[in-house]
Image (cartoon, coloured by chain):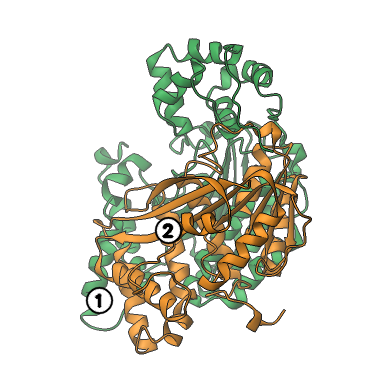
């Protein structure tokens, strides 16, 4: 028989602590936004009117890093059945990629139609990375950037258009296009042909001051290479400093190798072709990229007047135009 | 098991279907507000076993197991590949309380009577034909303990402002109708939502309650990216069914529709929602 009685009466200490924190309305809005809940939900929790689900409690500890330890100690007083321990320190990550993960990617590689093969392989790998490296959802984001196909044989930038993340990045990375050049860790990793690891926010800002990522405390950029030729870059951010220890780096490098299956042979470029330019800051880029999909639709209609065209072809054409525009933004607009 | 014994509308063994289900699962769980959003008053400390039928790659099972480490959560699915993939994710997620088994839900379940506290299923309409529901729910009820919860979630999909997308969704309903996979008398709708309560009632489930959820995957919404991925995959997977049921005249006609849908869902004004209904009740 399933018992439906809810705990009632006593206001537990974690709720009192929450009440104190959210008495600052700005802080209440920030926490609610990070957790993806209404302001009123937090108030109801603090007053003991409603009972959060376990996932909500985990998100609360993630959204309040300065009070995280207190919550971890207090919440079990009311919910002893809920495990609030941080189970997935980097050292605890499963260090072998399961065979089933490799098989799944291989199945997708041999079975799918060319049009959707690349995106499905890339999405599956990003999902596998999040599962394996962030099992307790402490905060990890993975994205893939690809070389923008050149008009004149030289690669001038990469476009980043596929990303997934756990909280706090959840839902913020999907399909937000941006361009990366030599100013970014991805651009440097691709130009140098080897991974770049940033163990702390300070370390990253020292070398890549224009590439700040909110909530990021450490990161790795790993080029996607085949026989020395490059197709793009796998980039992973963590909310934890020093997350990318040697064993994690090794797993990331393996996933970067697996990602080569998500690219066609013609999408790999020789090192001599990689001559990345400097892209403006993301905020400036977005003022020109917000109509990206509409431009592709428009380009498709224009191209289809002459011959049948599929969306990927129109997308490449628009990417090339945008790359050119962004590389030639006047200095004053680019903030230089 | 031979393919003939299966009633799936799409190939459940394909890597593409697994990829689609993994994305769909995340969209649905998030859109519905969690794994068991309506069970706010349930004391989960009294729950020890949960079964998820047609679990796919296991997203729902993983999330329940992660949130409730004291509960043993079991997922079953007919697809060997999918179960293998679900187990691999459970392994890297270090979820010792998540279990998976390859099993045909339309045959006697390999569990004892009165075994689970909650039996859950979402979007099983793809393989449970209308005349199989009574036997199927009787078997679900058998493995559920007295006072346990039987929980069904189904949807009506793709209410949209774009013509090709609307046509595509209408053709899916028509194809399901022609394949005798639908309760809809005309094939104008998916037809499953209105049947959830009567089916559970006929199965002898009591204290029935329901809750609806809207999943908005319009161009400016968080669920759009995964919605696009889902539609892209469905477009590829469902072509054989469309041709077999003759809801399109030719592969060329399908290719044209396919291309139009892909273009529309990236359009600036694209707006679309799906409605999910969860109905649940107790075994006396």
> Which element type, helix, strand or loop, lies under badge 1?
helix
Q: Is residue A319 left or right of residue A144?
A: left
Residue drawn at x 30%, y 82% is A308
Tell me, yes or no, whether the two marked residues, 1 and 2, touch with CB atoms within 8 Å: no
Residue A228 location, x and y as percent?
63, 65
Shade of chain B as shown in the rendered figure = orange
The residue shown at (70%, 56%) is: B142
Side of B142 where A216 appears, left or right: left
Residue topped by disc 1: A303
Q: In the image, residue A216 lies at what x, y percent?
A: 54, 34
Point 51% across, 40% down: residue: B37
The residue at the point 29 percent across, 67 percent down is: B166
Label 2 marks a residue whose chain is B
Q: Chain in green?
A: A
Q: In this view of the protein, which residue sits in the foreground, B85 or B122? A: B122
Q: Is residue A38 above or below residue A95?
A: above
Q: x%, y% of residue B44?
A: 65, 34
Is residue A271 visible to the viewer in this orientation of the structure? no
Q: Using the image as rendered, state which of residue B198 and residue B240 is in the foreground.
A: B198
Percent x, y of residue A209: 46, 34
Mark 1 nearby-residue class (10 Å; few <14, some 14–19, many ≥20): some
Q: Quadrant of residue A258?
A: bottom right
Tell me the residue that label 2 is attached to.
Answer: B193
What kind of element bears circle 2? helix
Vertical arrangement, residue B250 with respect to residue A113, above or below:
below
Compare residues A189 and B183 and report the one nearer the observer. Answer: B183
Alpha-carbon span between mark 1 and mark 2: 43 Å
């Amino acid at each position: 028989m399933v018992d439906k009685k809810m705990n009632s009466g006593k206001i537990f200490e974690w709720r009192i602590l929450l009440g104190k924190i959210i008495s600052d309305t700005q802080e209440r809005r920030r926490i609610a936004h990070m957790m993806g809940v209404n302001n009123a939900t937090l108030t109801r929790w603090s007053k003991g009117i409603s009972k959060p689900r376990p996932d909500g409690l985990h998100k609360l500890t993630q959204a309040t890093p300065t009070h995280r330890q207190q919550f971890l100690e207090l919440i079990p007083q009311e919910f002893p059945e809920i495990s609030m321990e941080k189970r997935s320190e980097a050292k605890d990550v499963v260090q072998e990629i399961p065979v089933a993960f490799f098989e799944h990617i291989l199945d997708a590689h041999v079975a799918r139609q060319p049009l959707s093969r690349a995106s499905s392989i890339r999405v599956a790998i990003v999902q596998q990375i999040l599962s394996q490296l962030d099992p307790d959802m402490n905060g990890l984001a993975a994205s893939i950037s690809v070389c923008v196909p050149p008009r004149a044989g030289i690669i001038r930038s990469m476009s980043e258009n596929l990303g997934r993340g756990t909280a706090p990045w959840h839902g913020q990375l999907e399909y937000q296009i941006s361009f990366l050049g030599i100013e970014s860790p991805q651009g440097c990793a691709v130009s140098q042909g080897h991974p770049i690891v940033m163990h702390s926010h300070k370390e990253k800002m020292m070398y890549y001051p224009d590439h700040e990522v909110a909530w990021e405390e450490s990161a790795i950029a790993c080029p996607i290479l085949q026989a020395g030729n490059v197709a793009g870059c796998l980039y992973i951010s963590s909310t934890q400093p020093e997350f990318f220890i040697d064993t994690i780096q090794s797993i990331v490098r393996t996933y970067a190798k697996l990602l080569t299956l998500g690219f066609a042979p013609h999408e790999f470029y020789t090192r001599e072709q990689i001559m990345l330019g400097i892209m403006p800051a993301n905020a400036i880029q977005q003022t020109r990229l917000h109509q990206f999909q509409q431009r592709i639709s428009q380009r498709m209609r224009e191209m289809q007047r002459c011959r049948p065209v599929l969306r990927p072809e129109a997308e490449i054409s628009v990417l090339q135009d945008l790359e050119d525009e962004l590389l030639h933004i006047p200095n004053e607009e680019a903030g230089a | 098991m031979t393919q003939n014994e299966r009633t799936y509308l799409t190939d459940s063994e394909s890597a593409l279907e697994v990829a689609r289900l993994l994305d769909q699962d995340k969209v649905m769980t998030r859109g519905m507000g969690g794994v068991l959003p309506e069970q706010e008053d349930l004391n989960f400390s009294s729950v020890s076993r949960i079964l998820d039928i047609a679990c796919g790659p296991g997203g729902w099972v993983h999330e329940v197991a992660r949130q409730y480490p004291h509960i043993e959560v079991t997922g079953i699915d007919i697809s060997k590949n999918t179960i293998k993939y679900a187990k691999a994710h459970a392994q890297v997620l270090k979820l010792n309380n998540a279990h998976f088994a390859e099993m045909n839900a339309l045959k006697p379940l390999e569990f004892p009577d009165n075994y689970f506290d909650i039996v859950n299923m979402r979007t099983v309409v793809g393989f449970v034909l209308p005349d199989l529901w009574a036997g199927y729910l009787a078997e679900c009820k058998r493995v559920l303990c007295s006072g346990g919860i039987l929980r069904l979630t189904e949807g009506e999909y793709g209410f949209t402002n774009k013509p090709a997308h609307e046509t595509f969704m209408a053709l899916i309903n028509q194809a399901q109708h022609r394949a005798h996979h639908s309760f809809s008398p005309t094939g104008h709708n998916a037809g499953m939502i209105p049947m959830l309560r009567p089916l559970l009632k006929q199965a002898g489930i009591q204290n029935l309650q329901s809750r609806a959820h809207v999943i908005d995957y319009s161009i400016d919404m968080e669920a759009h990216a995964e919605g696009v991925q889902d539609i892209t995959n469905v477009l590829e997977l469902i072509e054989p069914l469309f041709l077999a049921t003759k809801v399109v005249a030719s592969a060329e006609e399908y290719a044209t529709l396919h291309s139009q849908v892909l273009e529309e869902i990236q359009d600036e004004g694209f707006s679309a929602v799906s409605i999910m209904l969860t109905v649940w009740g107790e075994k006396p």
